[in-house]
Amino acid sequence: MNVIGLCDNSSKAVRIYKELRDIESINLYLLVCKNLDTGIVRYFLGHLYYFFKMNIRDKLLSASIILRGTLRVSSLNLYHEKILTWVKNKKPDIGLHAMGVIYKNSVISLFRLGIANPHIGLLPKYRGRSVMEWSILNGDPTGISTFFIDRGIDTGRRIILLEEIDISKFKDIITAKNYLFSLDLVMFRKAIEKLLSHENRYIENEVCKGERYYVMSKLFSSVVEKIMQFNSSG
Amino acid sequence: MEALQQRLKELSNRLAGMENNEIKMETYENKDPEECLRVVMVRYYPKCESGNITSKERDEYLSLLLDLTKNALSDDLRFLDAFNNAFEVLTRNKIKDQYDLRRLDLFLNAYRLILRTQIKRLSEK
């Protein structure tokens, strides 16, 4: 199985490599390139920032995987012909979403199975933004849904994994959210392992059974934090 | 409920001395509230939040919000929260234009009605 991690900085690429390199049945590739709407200067500054933030071991690791051809770092954007050709030549089965971007069909269609995205809300009910907060406000469980994306916002029909995750130990939104985001690699790994197993069955993302949520107001966020503080105190 | 009561108090202070417009619900109906909410939250709210909104866009933002008044009275809290968000960003800066002020006044009155209704609903639960 050919897997490509789509990243917007080397630090993310190295994280993915470290987590997934020991899965035997996959050929892992990593692509670091520019989003369509990111200026070249901003991209390079960001790139430098994340590169210098990496420890020396990760810097050496990134250099070694570049030399081995596993990691490609490019100043071109994702939709540049050269990048699309590079991706296509790898005959990828799965893409791993690690870029702040909504993909166009020209990219999605390059992946035989699709591009997997760990979304920090439980689908199909919670699509969109601030879904962790909305789940708490509505008294619903929180968790992560790893699914194959389409052009819509969390509307991809095939969910690979649905996992409820308890965040009751956290007292504030930012810490809880960071915790859920930090599980992206674990979810990628689980999703790949599930796809490699012969028992894989997708869960259908029945969009009609859920709603799209938006950025939560300060007023409601303060209510959510009160609920979190109450829950964390036992 | 406490948070809504607190917000209502804040809003009432803000409305003191302003025109008291009665909100006629039949004026504000929407055939596609989901799409209207999407446009409000994806197109206009971020612009208003970042301060990069023109007077025309703010007018459209307020107008679309008013169209969601009826939905914001329901138990689907996403619509109420669109009003919460708007209140938080619109009242941050002073609006000087008289036309904008009238529109803002209508919005604030609609928001007050929504908050009162939601508080009543919660207290009955």
Image: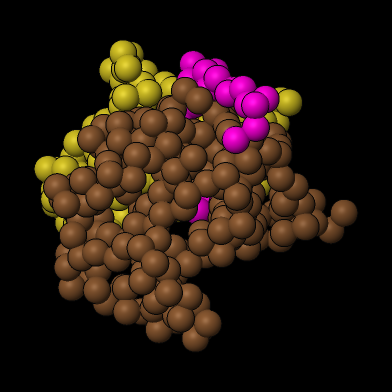
Chain colours: A brown, B yellow
Q: Judge whether residue A122 can be spotted in this image.
A: no
Q: Is residue A83 above or below residue B92?
A: above
> Which residue is nearer to you in this view: A102 or B63?
A102
Q: Is residue A113 above or below residue A218?
A: above
At a point 71% along the width and 45% down the height, the residue shown is A165
Q: Residue furthest right?
A: A234
At a point 57% along the width and 55% down the height, the residue shown is A20
On the rendered image, what quadrant is the C terminus of chain B found in? top right
x and y percentages locating residue B64 in the rendered image: 27, 30
Read off the magenta span: A196-221
On the rendered image, what quadrant is the N terminus of chain B found in? top right
Left or right side of B121 for A131: left
x and y percentages locating residue B33 in the rendered image: 36, 21
Is residue A198 in the magenta section?
yes
Left or right side of A178 for B16: left
Q: Is residue A202 above or below residue A188?
A: above
> Which residue is nearer to you in this view: A81 or B111?
A81
Is residue A168 in the magenta section?
no
> Which residue is nearer to you in this view: B74 or A208?
A208
